[in-house]
Structures are given as structure tokens and as C-alpha cells.
Image (cartoon, rainbow, N blue to C red):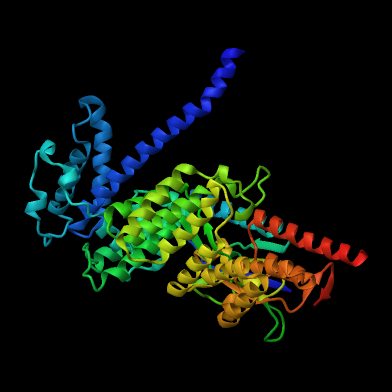
Amino acid sequence: MRYALLMNYREPGEGEISEEAIAEAMAAFGAYGRALAAAGVLVSGDVLQPTAATTTVTCREGGLRVQDGPFAETKEALAGIFVLDVADLDAAIGWAEKCPGAQWGVIEVRPSATALVNGEWTR
Amino acid sequence: MDALTTDDEDRPAAEAAGLAAAEAAGLAARDSYGRLLALLAASTGDIAAAEDALADAFERALRTWPERGTPANPDAWLLTVARNRLRDQWKSASAQRTVPLDNRQDSLTHTDDLDVDALPDRRLELMLVCAHPAIDPAAHTPLMLSTVLGFTAEQIGRAFSVPTATMATRLVRSKKRIKAARIPFRIPGADELPARMASVLEAVYGAYVIDWATTGPQARHLPPSEALHLAEVLTRCAPADPEAHGLAALVQLSASRAPARQDADGRFVPLADQDPSRWDADLIDRAHGHLRAAHARGRLGRFQLEAAIQAVHCARRRGGPTDWPTLLGLHRALHAIAPSLGSGVALAAVIAEVEGPAAGLAALNALLEEAGQRGRRFQPARATRAHLLARLGRTEEAVAAYDSALDLTHDRAERQYLQHRRDGVRRARGEARTG
């Protein structure tokens, strides 16, 4: 079963986080990524750029609407996504507990409904 | 060539001696730090101001001692300078004028007359403040490491896998809260003390292990000597508390086996297969001293029982098999007074040793039924279940159980070990079929 671990946390301002803190977080994510890979459960991992770089696309109201900025202005924003392939929700929660982002944010664990694998939609 | 060889042979011993001396000096410095900070913070509850004043005193010591020589009583010197510094802050315009000076504690004293050892040790009050119910439990252990041992936010952050800035914010917030909410530096009354001490013990234990809900307790990335030191400080501040001694013994006994937990190739070695000669004999002896001190108090508790269990395992160092019946009694008592998923799984494993794997599996299944969701998400339960099924020859189920345990195993060495066991069961099944 594929699960997405969605990391949500407050976006830091420009220069709010020191170089050292960034280096530490990178080291923590490095170790986490190696553990995921070694366990053979990692499908993909992306840490996202700030919401300022977001473009929202919708055709909900007929016609294309491209909007500068995120879908909703909230205090905490989607910050990164790990897609894991693990046996069940318990295993996914186990990995979410150890995700460095859980230390300063919230991890949403969402099962995948369908996924593109090698260009084909799979279940 | 000869000289080189001799040199090389001597180096480890000399290095070990140097390290031991450095460690001793480091611990003494941490001891002074915690004692001085507790004294400085106790009267006002303002830990941050006390830290600043103490940092100033240390900085002045670094500047003046090399020229004028180290004072006869360095701690007294540091305390006096830090107190003067605090008084300067109070007098300054920016400080609140409503804080009364405590003349008894703050009168100018000639530093050589000030005997720090004669001053009360207020580190227990400090530890009680750090583990106060009004403080976020997640901050208890970091606060203790910061105030009692003087660790930096960076060092503590590393131990908790949290960036320095995040840890620093957490520490600052808690210290502000202590001051703002006026959490008192005092030993609570007898009716309140046991519960408050339990949080202190829990926080000290937290310096040694990190308790994951999914994978159970795991050692922290702190240099082990420093978690050990916090436990030792607590036994000195609360010598009459048998659980403090029990906790010190527990931490020492678990730490004593650290060198034997992985083999030369980094593979996980389970307790039963560990080479006892690789355990740290000195730590085991120190732990036994604490167990004797605890026993003399005649009040049993969770940490003493956990330490006693470790001590029975460590007795294998003297040769002879593990005393499983004694372990069963200890595990039963532990699960009765401090029931947890971990204690229940451990009890089931020991029942399997004494009464056979079928009895162990029955106990484990009963426990898991009761625990529901949480039990299913607990890696030690899955791993124990797999081992028991394998021993019962229920190979199909054992293989599936090993796979399910592996789903929740994040430690690389332990994954390799479980895979190895699973593959062993699989091979045996294959041979049974062909044979």
C-alpha cells in the first residue's frame, strides 16, 4: 500500500532559520532518507519550496484559472511529501513518528488512491 | 621499530587514562555548573538571568585567572561574581524595581570565606522545577540537560534529532514559563513528593532512552556518560529515594552492555548471544552499589525492578546459565506495578523461557487483544510473536510475523537480524518439504 506522508509546518521567514539549523535539519532528513531507502519502503521524497513559489491551477469555475500563491492561506503549509510503499497504516505511522518534520510540525498520513507507476495508473 | 611498537602499544592505555581524566574534569565542571545555577536561580526563579550571570562569571574567570592565578575556592569565586552580576541587573534601570534583595543570600561575602560545599545543594529543587507538571513533558529532559548539566541547545538538539534553533526556542519558552508562572524552587510536601519525583525520574530516564510509541525504547545519541551523570546527580541529591538508585543502576547496567550489542560487522547481537566479556565490568559494579543502596530502603519500585532484571542478565558474566525463574518473578512484579506494552511483551518472552513457547504466545496474544490498536503498532510485540511462532515450528505464520515485524523495524542492524531469522525459518521449511 502506498502512503503519502505530508509534512505541514509554519513557513519560516527569509533568514529566520540559521545556516546551522538548516544543516542540522538536512542531516536529520539525510539519515531519515537513508533509513527509508535501506528498509526498501521509499517511493519518493520531496521537500517543497515555500508557498511563495506556488502556483494554483483550477478549472473548477469553468475555464483555466491560474493563481499566484497557495490554494489556501493557512499558518501551516504543506512543506514536503514522502511517498512510501509499506504494508499497512501501522507501518506508515511508525515511519511518520520518526520523520524529522514531526519534531516541529504535523505529518498527515494519507493513503494513495491510485498512483502512476511507469506511466500507468495502478492501484 | 621497537620503539614504535612500544609506543603503539602504550597509546591506547595512555589515551584511555587521558580520556578518563578529561571526562572526570568535564563531569566536575558540570557538577559545579548545576550547583551554582541552582543556587543562583532558586531565589528568583529566573533561570535565564542566572544563566547569563553565571556565563559572565565564567567569562571573567577565563580572563582573570590566567593572570592572577586560580582562586583557592573557584566555585565560591564564580558564585560571588555571578551574584554581583545579578544584583547589577536588578539595580539597572531595565530591571524591575519590585524584586527585593535577599540580604541573607546576597550580602557581599569575602569569597574565600564562602564555602560552596556548606551551601545547600538545590539541584533537586531545580530538577523538580524542570519536571514540573506545568511544563510540557517533552521539555522536561531537555531542560534538565540544559540547567543541571549545562549542555547547549545544540548538544541537546542533536540528542533529540531537533535543529538547534527549535531546541533553543523550546528551552527559552520553558524557562520563561517557569519565571512567569512562578514555579517554586522547593521540595514539595510528602503528599505531593512521590508523584513529582516520578516525573523527575522519568525525565532522567529520558536522557538515556527515547521511547518511540511504535518501536519501544531506544538509546539516545547522547554520549552515554552524560546520561549516566544525570542519574548519578539525582542519587546524590535524593540519596534516600530508592528509585533514584534503581534508575542509576538501570542506566548503568544497560549502558554496560552497549559494547556487545553489535558485532564487528555492525550486526545486531541479541542479549542471549552477547559475549559477557565485552560488557563493562566497572559500570556493572557501580550499578550493584546502587542496587544495594536501594534495597536498604525497603521500598520497591519500577526502576529498581527493571535494574534487578538487568542485573540477573548481567550475572551471566560470572558464568552459568540465565536464571529464568527469578527473571519471571521480577517481570511479573514489574508488569503488576508498572504495566506497559513493553513490560507485557517482555513478560511474555520470559514466560516462554520458563513455561515453554506456547505459554509465552498465549500470554502475548492475551496482551495484544487487550491493547488493541496500540499493541498492533508495537514492533517488540511483532518481533517476539515471530520468534515464538518459529520456536513452535509454525513456520508459515512465523515468516509472516517476521515480515510484519520488519514493517515496523527502522534500525538497520535490527532489520538485518530479523531478516536473517526469517530466512532461517524459510530455509528450514524448505528442507522439511524436500526431506
Q: Nearer the viewer, residue A22 or B302?
A: B302
> Residue at 30% across / 61% down in the picture?
B297
Name the quadrant of the C terminus of chain A.
bottom right
Report whether residue B161 is seen: no
Tell which of B235 and A31 is nearer to you: B235
Q: Residue at x 42, y 73 (%)?
A: B337
Q: In the rendered view, would you say B131 is above or below B292?
A: below
Image point 34% across, 63% down: which residue?
B200
In the visual, does B212 lie left or right of B121? right
The percent position of residue B238, horizontal first and vertical second, equals 28, 57
- x%, y% of residue B64? 23, 30
Q: Quadrant of residue B434?
A: bottom right
- Residue B285 is situated, as x and y percent measured from the top left of the image, at 43, 46
Instruction: Give the total of numbered labels.
Output: 0
Please identify the residue farthest to the bottom as the structure is shown. Answer: A61
Along the line of sight, the residue nearer the viewer: B59 or B370: B370
Quadrant showing the N terminus of chain A:
bottom right
Residue A19 in the image: above or below residue A11: above
Q: Nearer the viewer, residue B435 or A93?
A: B435
Q: Is B372 situated left or right of B253 in this image?
A: right
Q: Is residue B139 left or right of residue A100?
A: left
Name the quadrant containing residue B45.
Answer: bottom left
- State the image coordinates of residue B339 (x, y, percent, origin top left): 47, 74
Q: Is residue B24 visible?
A: yes
